């Protein structure tokens, strides 16, 4: 039950994987803008947005809400946290996380790569059976011949992006047909960015392993594959980009920011068709010298004046508004109702509006003025 999962996540101080729309407050306009972008990406464009806010402003919660939006529109979603283990300056490592964290609308908790491959093959089989009126069992020889032709045709465009990628997919189909699990698993490992032996690469007819120089091509290729499998495209969420500010070497920071600049330019030139990028980070990322300002070409592309009264949500950066007491009350009401639904009781009899008001005041007011509190900490307490 989703309501129970949401309550459990809030009790643990984490953002729910599902059900964020049940407790979302004050982000309707921002989500409407993202939805408008996704609708355009779905029909062939590409786009991005930076979500900027201080700690406790709800960036991770917002990203989770975007994830729900994307799933509803049949996108494959991959959420990646930039960290010391996944440094933005080493995009080959980011690619591995993108593949590892891909999820489909129907399988939100299971890695998606093998699912997408199987669905793609199933779609090819259905096309062959419907178009050619072939029974795969009674007309097995004809069916297999037509399947190879269809797969070759489907992989033509993908091969223009990466012939190695296309060859790997072709090998995967042949291995599955022959029951060769060793080779099929090797293909999956290679697609995930793992290094495989020279003999297996020869079997797959691929010349390279994942490297920094080809990682971006791999992203484009995997997106084309899942699009061919029937999905709307790929949504990549890169969270906690402010981690880049902590890189000791300026060269590492520049490389990380250069990767961002490359993706922004690629989106503007529609080089990532049916792909959407959502980035999130702190205000310091936008305003300090170790942030975006340290790479002028990037800063020029995304610099936006922080405007509270006349917010233009269509700009490349959305600044999230701080969580105030009014929002805390609104989300408390929603969590109270959700707790009642999850546990089969009426919490309003004991957790009254007056109680909520007093709790918020106790936790957010000191010396007669409002003080900042993390929504995550407050909701865990509540």
Image (tube, rainbow, N blue to C red):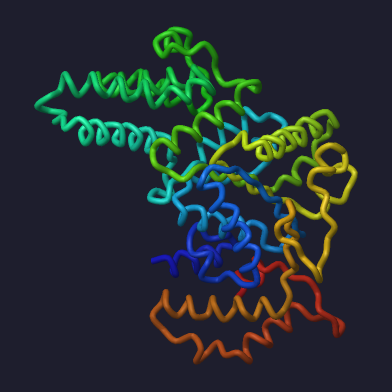
Asked whether, in this view, residue 39 is left or right of residue 370, the answer is: left
Residue 50: x percent and y percent?
Answer: 71, 51
Image position of 24 with respect to 150: above or below: below
Image position of 146 with respect to 351: above or below: above
Residue 145: x percent and y percent?
Answer: 23, 18
- Quadrant of residue 173 within the rendered picture: top left
Q: In which quarter of the image is the C terminus?
A: bottom right
Asked whether, in this view, residue 175 is left or right of residue 315, the answer is: left
Along the viewing direction, whichever of 285 and 352 lies nearer the viewer:
285
Identified at 67% across, 87% down, the residue is 357
Count the marks: 0
Identified at 27% across, 24% down, the residue is 147
Residue lying at the far right in this picture: please name it: 289
Residue 67: x percent and y percent?
Answer: 54, 54
Image position of 134 with respect to 37: above or below: above
Residue 154: x percent and y percent?
Answer: 39, 27
Residue lying at the far left in this picture: please name it: 138
Asked whether, in this view, residue 300 is left or right of residue 138, the answer is: right
Identified at 75% across, 43% down, the residue is 243
- Quadrant of residue 11 within the rendered picture: bottom right
Residue lying at the far front in this picture: please name it: 131
Identified at 42% across, 51% down, the residue is 105
Q: In which quarter of the image is the N terminus?
A: bottom left
């Amino acid at each position: 039950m989703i309501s129970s999962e949401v309550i459990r996540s809030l009790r643990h101080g984490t953002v729910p994987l599902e059900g964020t729309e049940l407790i979302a407050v004050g982000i309707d306009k921002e989500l409407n803008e993202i939805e408008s972008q996704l609708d355009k990406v779905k029909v062939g464009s590409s786009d991005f947005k930076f979500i900027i806010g201080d700690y406790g402003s709800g960036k991770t919660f917002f990203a989770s809400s975007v994830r729900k939006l994307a799933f509803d529109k049949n996108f494959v979603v991959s959420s990646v946290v930039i960290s010391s283990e996944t440094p933005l300056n080493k995009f080959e490592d980011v690619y591995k996380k993108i593949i590892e964290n891909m999820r489909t609308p129907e399988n939100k908790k299971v890695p998606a790569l093998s699912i997408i491959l199987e669905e793609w093959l199933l779609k090819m089989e259905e096309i062959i059976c419907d178009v050619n009126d072939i029974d795969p069992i009674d007309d097995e020889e004809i069916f297999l011949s037509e399947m190879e032709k269809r797969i070759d045709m489907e992989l033509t465009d993908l091969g223009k992006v990466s012939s190695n990628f296309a060859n790997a997919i072709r090998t995967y189909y042949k291995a599955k047909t022959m029951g060769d699990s060793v080779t099929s698993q090797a293909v999956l490992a290679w697609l995930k960015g793992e290094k495989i032996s020279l003999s297996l690469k020869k079997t797959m007819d691929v010349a390279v392993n994942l490297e920094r120089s080809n990682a971006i091509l791999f992203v484009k290729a995997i997106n084309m594959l899942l699009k061919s499998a029937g999905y709307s495209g790929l949504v990549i969420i890169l969270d906690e980009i402010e981690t880049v500010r902590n890189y000791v070497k300026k060269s590492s920071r520049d490389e990380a920011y250069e990767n961002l600049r490359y993706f922004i330019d690629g989106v503007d030139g529609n080089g990532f068709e049916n792909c959407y990028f959502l980035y999130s980070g702190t205000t310091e990322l936008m305003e300090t010298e170790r942030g975006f300002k340290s790479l002028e070409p990037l800063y020029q592309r995304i610099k936006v004046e922080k405007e509270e009264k006349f917010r233009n949500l269509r700009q490349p950066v959305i600044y999230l508004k701080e969580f105030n007491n009014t929002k805390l009350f609104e989300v408390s009401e929603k969590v109270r109702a959700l707790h009642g639904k999850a546990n089969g009781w009426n919490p309003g009899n004991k957790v009254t509006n007056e109680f909520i008001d007093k709790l918020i005041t106790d936790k957010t007011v000191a010396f007669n003025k409002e003080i900042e509190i993390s929504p995550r900490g407050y909701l865990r307490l509540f």
